[in-house]
Amino acid sequence: MAPKETDALLYIDGVSVSFDGFKALNELSLFIDKGEMRAIIGPNGAGKTTMMDVVTGKTRPDFGTILFDGDIDLTKLDEAAIAELGIGRKFQKPTVFEQQTVWDNLELALAGRRDPLSALFQPDGPKEHARIEELLGIIRLESQAREKAANLSHGQKQWLEIGMLLAQEPKLLLVDEPAAGMTDAETEATADLLKDIAQEKSVVVVEHDMAFVRALDVKVTVLNEGSVLSEGSIDHVSGDPKVIEVYLGR
Ligand code: ADP
Ligand code: MG
């Protein structure tokens, strides 16, 4: 049964989005609880990225309800206002400052829009320093703190960007295909890292890699043709005949 609107951190109900008559989202309904981590899977074109686009204000739904934190109507807000509310989004491609060190990237993210330039030239206060150290631990980059971001592996850059999002203290983190292009070891470490983060934040993660989704060990939503096809544990959804048909029928 669906929780009441006030219970869910993110409440998506009956959301539809069309592009030239093609329904990318078709009456999508999805509820994410406070403190929950949810994995979203589904074939290419299922609407996974579009779902993140409507939550972050990049795309406007044609119909439907999207509420955050009880009663905040996200369909009325622009991207900047939605980010400000505490919804952080990690895109597939990492966008770190390549010529800055890992430490400085985190420092810049901590300063945020307030004062990004002077952050680099002023010594950080003890509070800032402690938070950066904490973030380095979460993203497994303590030993790389003084490295230029350009020298990190692809996987490490993804982690750095996750750290930069965390620096802005989001309530909800949306992560689109974090394991794409990662080595097996990096994929495994990413699952652990997201599980750590999910102890404090709500996280929605879209991913294709089934080993990764299994390692997350959370409730899974399968999207297909813009709606929810199946929902439950990874064992439940991977045994669901509807899901098997969609994946094997291709
Ligand atoms: P997924 O992330 O699950 O692979 P997407 O949400 O990216 O799927 O896309 C769902 C469908 O909507 C696809 O068929 C895609 O081509 C289409 N689509 C997504 N964004 C746009 C857009 N801005 N304009 C036109 N079609 C789009
Ligand atoms: Mg996508």
Image: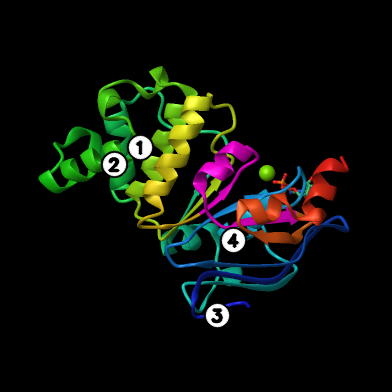
Given residues 202 and 56, the one toward you in this image is: 202
**Total numbered circles:** 4
Horizontal side of residue 6 vs 14, given as left or right: left
Look at label 3 and name its amino acid. Answer: Glu
Side of 79 relative to 126 (left or right)? right
Callout 4: 10 Å neighbours few (<14), some, many (20+)?
Answer: many
Type of amino acid under label 1:
Ile
| Mark 4, residue position | 55
Q: Quadrant of the C terminus?
A: top right
Going from N to C along the chain, the mark reached first, 1 or 4, is 4
Q: Pointer 1: what residue?
A: 139
Name the residue at 80% across, 48% down: 244
Mark 1 and mark 3 in contact? Answer it, CB < 8 Å: no
Region rendered in magenta: 204-223
* Residue 200 seen: yes
* Mark 1 Cβ and ligand 2 under 8 Å apart: no
Tell me the residue that label 3 is attached to: 5
Q: Residues within 10 Å of mark 2 (few under 14, many from 20)?
A: many
| Distance between the alpha carbons at the discs numbered 2 and 1 | 6 Å
**Residue 124 on the magenta segment:** no
Give the image quarter of residue 202.
bottom left
Residue 109 is situated, as x and y percent measured from the top left of the image, at 34, 43
Amino acid type indicated by mark 2: Leu
Confirm or deny contact between disc 1 and disc 4 (CB under 8 A): no
Query: Up-down: is 124 above or below 13?
Result: above
**Is 226 placed left or right of 147 in the picture?**
right
| Cα separation between marks 3 and 2 | 32 Å
Q: Which residue is mark 2?
A: 135
